[in-house]
Amino acid sequence: MKITPIYQFKNILFFFIGILILSSCSPKNKNLLFITGKEKLAKEPVTVIQGDQNIASTSQRIQAGNILAIKNLQSTVQLTGERGAVNTGQLEIQTFLVENDGTVNIPVLGKLKLIGMTRVEAEKFLEDQYKEKLLKDPIIDINITNAKVTFLGEFVSQTNVLLTKDQTHLVELLGTVGGLNARANKKKIKIIRGDLENPTIIIANLSDINSLSDKRLILQNNDIIYAEPVGLFRSSDRLIGVNTILQTLLAAVNAYIIINNISK
């Protein structure tokens, strides 16, 4: 049987259609992050789909890796037992790393376990320790200088944001990252919290005004906030790959036709 140019073109066309079909069958969630398979459980304005169902804490708790800025508001006597510079009007601030075992090595006081305490609890604890060993009626102030959260996905800006106060609601920081973009699924904002080996996962429906009053959306140190695209844009992402294949194959078909016409 003689193979004609038309026959060859049909074979190329069928090959091209087969590639498109295979491309369209790619996993629909391949571009999504942090999929648990429990997302359908989210029925309320805020739903905990995995982990601790009774999240009560709204204040930051000290974690390993935190850097604590500690100062005595009562006087210029340093926390090391030395006296600060005279007539500067400035209070001495010391910074301390929370070690992996949850302890902080503070001069004079030694190693103290602060992990799991809120800022207020740790302040009261250190005041009692300093009263016993160094200072008279100290007023201790503690700040966690590196507490942060991470925004990923369909936000205008994907970035890390420092938490500058004890209680920061998710909505407060949306303005910092420029808000959600046009692709975002506002009904499925995911917060991943705590131990990454067994995290607590929260889904917030920001289209429901009742989510504003939910204390579970008060962010904690090292929270990951992820906004996935709505289904329409997930489909369009798959089509981008198909479109690339389409353009390449059309270019090959055009080249074949041109070469075939020249060779006649």
Image: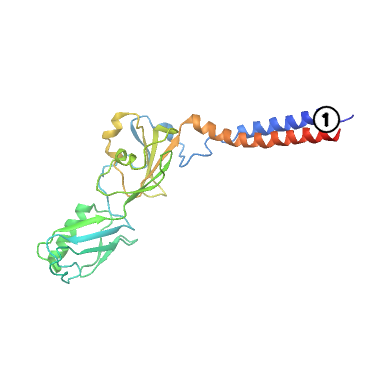
Q: What percent of the width, then of the height, locates residue 142?
A: 22, 57
Where, by quadrant of the figure, is residue 36 drawn? top left
Which image quarter is the C terminus in?
top right
Q: In this view, does 18 lie to the left or right of 223?
A: right
Instruction: Please name the residue that numbered disc 1 is placed on.
Output: 5
- The residue located at (24%, 55%) in the rendering is 143
Circle 1 residues within 10 Å: few <14, some 14–19, many ≥20: few
Where, by quadrant of the figure, is residue 71 drawn? bottom left
Q: What percent of the width, then of the height, locates residue 27?
A: 56, 36
Which residue occupies the extreme front position in the image?
262
Q: In this view, does 35 lie to the left or right of 46?
A: right
Figure check: 108 above or below 101: below
Which image quarter is the N terminus in?
top right
Figure check: 177 above or below 16: below
Which residue occupies the extreme left position in the image?
136
Q: State the residue in front, 52 or 215.
A: 215
Q: What element carries label 1?
A: helix
Query: Residue flagged by tag 1: what amino acid is it?
Result: Pro
Q: State the residue in front, 133 or 186.
A: 186
Q: In this view, does 235 lie to the left or right of 112?
A: right
- The residue located at (31%, 57%) in the rendering is 66
Q: What percent of the width, then of the height, locates residue 157?
A: 40, 43
